Image (tube, helix red, strand yellow):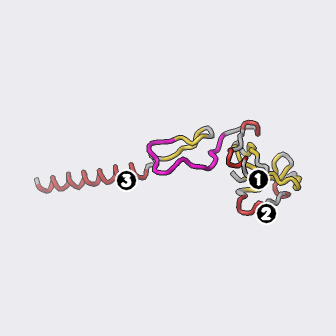
Amino acid sequence: MKKLLNIILIVAVTLIIVLVGMKTFSGEDTWICSDGEWIKHGNPSTPKPTTQCDKFCVSDNECETPMKFLFQSNCPFGSACINNKCRVVCPIYESACTTNTNCNCDQRGDRTLNCICHRGTCVSIEG
């Protein structure tokens, strides 16, 4: 009888540890990107992300440039639909292009996430 109680106790403790672990590491309390907006899921311990949430798009006119980029004077930021995701871009006007290999965004430094040719102009993707 004592052996059976020990087994039940071990199973119960193991089950509790597994359930607590699942709750802790399940991503239940987080921010989720949905339709270009950060949606609170559960009770996140971190503040709402300040990065742009990827919004699905098919054309540039579906994308909006976040205000935090519009007030910066180091680039005439805009938004573009690149690979069906809205991205914040900084055009490199002196660089006309036909392919990505024609582009050089070195002047943007570490702000550049990627440098591509978009509609005949090199752009630095920065958000």
Q: Earlier in the sequence, mark 3 or mark 1?
A: 3
Under mark 3, the amino acid is Gly
- For disc 2, the marked residue is 106
Q: What residue appears at the point 67 percent right and 39 percent down from the top-left corner?
A: 56
58 in relation to 77, above or below = above
Q: What residue appears at the point 14 percent right and 56 percent down from the top-left corner?
A: 3
Question: Real-space Cα distance between discs 3 and 1?
Answer: 47 Å
Return the residue nearer the eye: 30 or 78: 78
Q: Residue 21, which numbered label?
A: 3
Q: Which region of the structure is painted magenta? A: 40-55
Return the residue nearer the eye: 52 or 22: 52
Q: Residue 73, which numbered label?
A: 1
Is disc 1 placed on a helix, strand or loop? Answer: loop
Question: Real-space Cα distance between discs 2 and 3?
Answer: 45 Å
Q: Earlier in the sequence, mark 2 or mark 3?
A: 3
What secondary structure do most residues of the magenta stretch adopt?
loop
Is residue 46 left or right of 91 when viewed as pictured?
Answer: left
Across and down, in percent, residue 12 comes to 24, 51
Q: What residue appears at the point 60 percent right and 40 percent down from the top-left corner?
A: 37
